[in-house]
Image: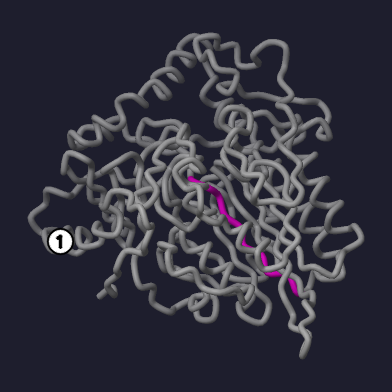
Amino acid sequence: MMWFVLSVGLSYLVSPSFAKPRPDVLFVAIDDMNDWISLLDPESPIRTPNLERLAKRGTLFKRAYCASPACNPSRVATLTGLRPTSTGVYGNKSNWRKVLPGRKTIMQQFRAAGYEVKGAGKIFHHHLDGAFHDDASFDEFQPMAPQNMPEDKLNGAPQYGSPNTDWGEWPSEETDTIDFKTADYCIEVLQGDRSEEPLFLACGIFKPHSPFFAPAIYHEPYRGMDLPERNPDDWNDLPSGADDLMNSKRWFWTGMMEVEDQSSGSYQRFIEAYAACCAFADAQLGRVLDALDASPRGKETIVVLWSDHGFHLGEKDHIEKFALWEKANRIPMIVVAPGVTTPGSVCNAPVDLTALYPTLLELAGLPEDSRADGDSLVPQLKNPDHERPSPALMTYGRGNHAVRTKRWRYIRYADGTEELYDHELDPEEWTNVASAPEHVAVLKEHRQWLFMVEADPVADLKRKPKIKSK
């Protein structure tokens, strides 16, 4: 659930015969931010000026997707370069390091190459108070600050028992937030004295992850904002596989409707609070970018920004992630690579987050990792129209997968049932056309990609073979 910004400025590693420039890396993650933002939807009321500012410097990937619509499996796939089907890490409680004891994270790759690696905030999933953090990935790390919680729930909804299911204006001082402190750490690193070693700096911004708390100033612009579009018959054409996967998630939406019945306007305030948290996260990104721009290496910085997955706000009668539909999987992603990317360029090819691991290695001039499941984005950074070797692939839970091509979203569940959505005609995914006879060829074309995500985890983690897209 989050976005990352990768920044690379030039420093020098000295060998006996020559000085070779090596890029610094700033890796910033923003958690749970979906595609209903002005970066990806100019008509969205949720304004993200700092993301747009960043996109003007490099390449915006307009069809970027997570590897899995849940925090832990998405982050593990991104940071190790291995899909859930290669690792067996399908859920938020899977101890990824236990099943991948020898796999180098992207940070470890850079440490091994002589980088000083620092970080702060939410990089790995923070289940069990940071139990999934990986000390071997950092020379220095500042954990997320404790969540500053109000004494009583702000939304007045005790049946939403978890403190995370709360929203409203909190705290009064921006400096008391988790993300302000994370940004402060990263600003200090960027402004501080530097060693001769190149730097990899990871900055994990927690918002807009729940609880949807942000200081009052961020709520003001969103009073009375429009709600997401919904279709009351949206679940009527879902197959049995979707019912099996999603029925346990229905309480997110039904619970919200119970709150709405008891306190009219609660759903509106929930949406407004999410928007406020997006604006707050964008502001923290802006603070880090300001410090980067003021640093001696700012002009040479490579930036990669992404979220770990999307988020439903009531679309398809669903709240949260944990689904294979578009809204839970589409993310913002930007890459700025001076000398490689063209400022203001846009890539429309579907890509998923497993591409970042090989991309970072290639941009930094580090050796290729042949076991990585994704393909580098460098060809698209040089030419946004360059064809990708495969579409975007997503997995949630064992046996449930989605394939995203430019026009279509195809989903196949563990019981073999399917969904198919035509995004040219149905961007809201209201009509499942998998049973339409005229789409037999489309289904066949998309099924061919499932071989890349259907295998059980393999002990040697060897890369699966690939075919070229037609």
Residues 86 and 470: in front is: 86
Name the image quarter holding residue 114. bottom right
Q: Specify whether 301 is left or right of 3.
A: right
State the residue position of label 1. 444
Q: Position of residue 182 (x, y in %)?
A: 76, 42
Q: Residue furthest bottom?
A: 17
Q: Residue furthest left?
A: 437
Name the image quarter holding residue 444. bottom left
Q: Position of residue 13 (x, y in %)?
A: 77, 77
Residue type at tag 1: Lys
Q: How is the image coloured?
A: one colour
Q: Position of residue 59 (x, y in %)?
A: 58, 70
Residue at left offset 50%, top offset 54%: 103
Q: How many marks?
A: 1
Residues 239 and 217: in front is: 239
Q: Residue furthest right?
A: 193
SS for dot 1: helix
34 magenta-colored? no
Q: Which residues are magenta?
A: 300-309
Residue 298 drawn above or below residue 401: below
Residues 260 and 376: in front is: 376
Residue at left offset 77%, top offset 90%: 17
Q: Specify whether 337 is left or right of 466.
A: right
* Within-10-Å neighbours for mark 1: few <14, some 14–19, many 20+: few
Residue at left offset 73%, top offset 27%: 146
Residue at left offset 56%, top offset 39%: 125
305 magenta-colored? yes
Q: Which quadrant is home to the C terminus?
A: bottom left
Q: Specify whether 104 is left or right of 437.
A: right
